[in-house]
Amino acid sequence: MTFPAFQQEDVKTDISQKLPDQQFLLFTTKEEDLKTAETKKTSRIHEYEKENTRSVCLLEQKRKVVSSNIDVPPARKSPEELDMDKVTAAMVLTSLSTSPLVRSPPIRPNESLNGSWKEGGFVPSSTSSSGYWSWNAPSDQSNPSTPSPPLSADSFKAFRTPSQPDDGIDEAETSNLLFDEPIPRKRKNSMKVMFKCLWKNCGKVLSTAAGIQKHIRTIHLGRVGESDYSDGEEDFYYTEIRLNTDSVADGLSSLSPVSPSLASPPSFSTQDAIRPETSCAKTETKLMTPLSRSAPTNLYLVHTDHAYQVSPTHNRPAGSGEQKQSHTVLSSPPRVAFGLRKPRGEGKKCRKVYGMENRDMWCTACRWKKACQRFID
DNA sequence: ACTGCCGGGGA
DNA sequence: TCCCCGGCAGT
């Protein structure tokens, strides 16, 4: 019987994303279960990305392959393992039935079409000891050196080894959701309101507004001790989504980040925001020091629109004396942490407008190599 | 390489 | 205070 095996495996995989490690340990009995789940998830994510670029025609082919694989017998297990897995599955299913997140968001459909989003693919950080799960880090973490083979029906077949009977079902269904095709096997179709964190490369989805606010405060704003404090502005950074409880992926695809700059409300200039983003993501999985946690550059950039400035220097007037501090006070990532240097102005300045030959037409500041006062950004 | 501009220093 | 410029960082 294949289906139970699929369920328990799949569930365990999802659980590994949704619960802190300590809790997850309650549900699993073996360390290799953790590893297997992680590995599978990673490769599945990889596969999903590829899949999105595929045509509907290919999907049809794939579904055939998948359906033929559903009957493949599951990996052989000893009777004890099976019993243990049954117990595990029962516990997990019971737990999930009360959990807001039934399925993890395996992919955001447009992600593969956009480089900057792709950079922050979903990778479960189940190895984190911080107690949070998150999607972060580049998606090709699974195998950076070897690109995935071009996808064909054959490659799908190869991908679905008998030890992974779950992937076929899971993926076929996700494909249906992504491409808005009728779903053969319907689960209950209740809608659920979730809240998605819109901080770039985060995408955390929680069931309550309070939860997402707390997430933003603790993870992105670094307000650890003041969990109940709210300045009322977090709602700029999460969005309400409605989704089928049988697939979070569907919900996420419905709010697909058409353009990263549009989708992420704190619309930082992307160049400035992307790099710090990775460091921000890292802080979730690493030991959080006050410095590393509190000052992704995007926070610095945000503060012009919102009061999210966390940097201790945020009350200073723009200008004097900040640059050197970022070098001397901070030891590790020298500048990325605090975007202390004022973002370079986009517009043309006197130098560009008048040229070097008309230097006398420049504003005083430009002549003195100071911040232009005539063409202020 | 070009550009914007911070930080420092001379007059 | 005015003015200049070395040097850093973004494009």
Image: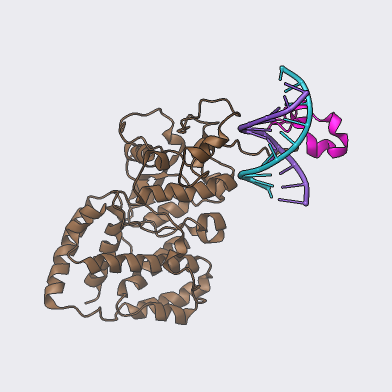
Chain colours: A brown, B purple, C cyan
Between residues A247 and A151, which one lies in front from this camera angle? Answer: A151
Q: Position of residue A104 (x, y in %)?
A: 35, 56
Q: How many numbered callouts?
A: 0
Highlighted magenta segment, given as a residue range = A350-377
Q: Quadrant of the N terminus of chain A?
A: bottom left
Between residues A319 and A103, which one lies in front from this camera angle? Answer: A319
Query: As drawn, is B8 to the left or to the right of A200?
Result: right
Q: Quadrant of the C terminus of chain A?
A: top right
Residue at the image position 48 percent from the left and 29 percent from the top = A307
Between residues A140 and C2, which one lies in front from this camera angle? Answer: C2
Query: As drawn, is A136 to the left or to the right of A361?
Result: left
Q: Residue furthest right?
A: A357
Q: Position of residue A297 (x, y in %)?
A: 51, 41
Residue at the image position 39 percent from the left and 67 percent from the top = A44
Residue A369 forms part of the magenta stretch: yes
Q: Position of residue A354 (x, y in %)?
A: 84, 36
Residue at the image position 84 percent from the left and 39 percent from the top = A356
- The answer to whether residue A83 is visible is yes
Q: Quadrant of residue A107?
A: bottom left
- The answer to whether residue A349 is visible is no
Q: Please, is residue A22 above or below residue A310 in the view?
A: below
Residue A99 forms part of the magenta stretch: no
Query: As drawn, is A212 to the left or to the right of A299?
Result: left
Query: As drawn, is C11 to the left or to the right of A235?
Result: right
Between residues A39 and A358, which one lies in front from this camera angle? Answer: A358
Residue at the image position 34 percent from the left and 37 percent from the top = A214
Q: Please, is residue A348 above or below residue A319 in the view?
A: below
Q: Position of residue A37 (x, y in %)?
A: 30, 66
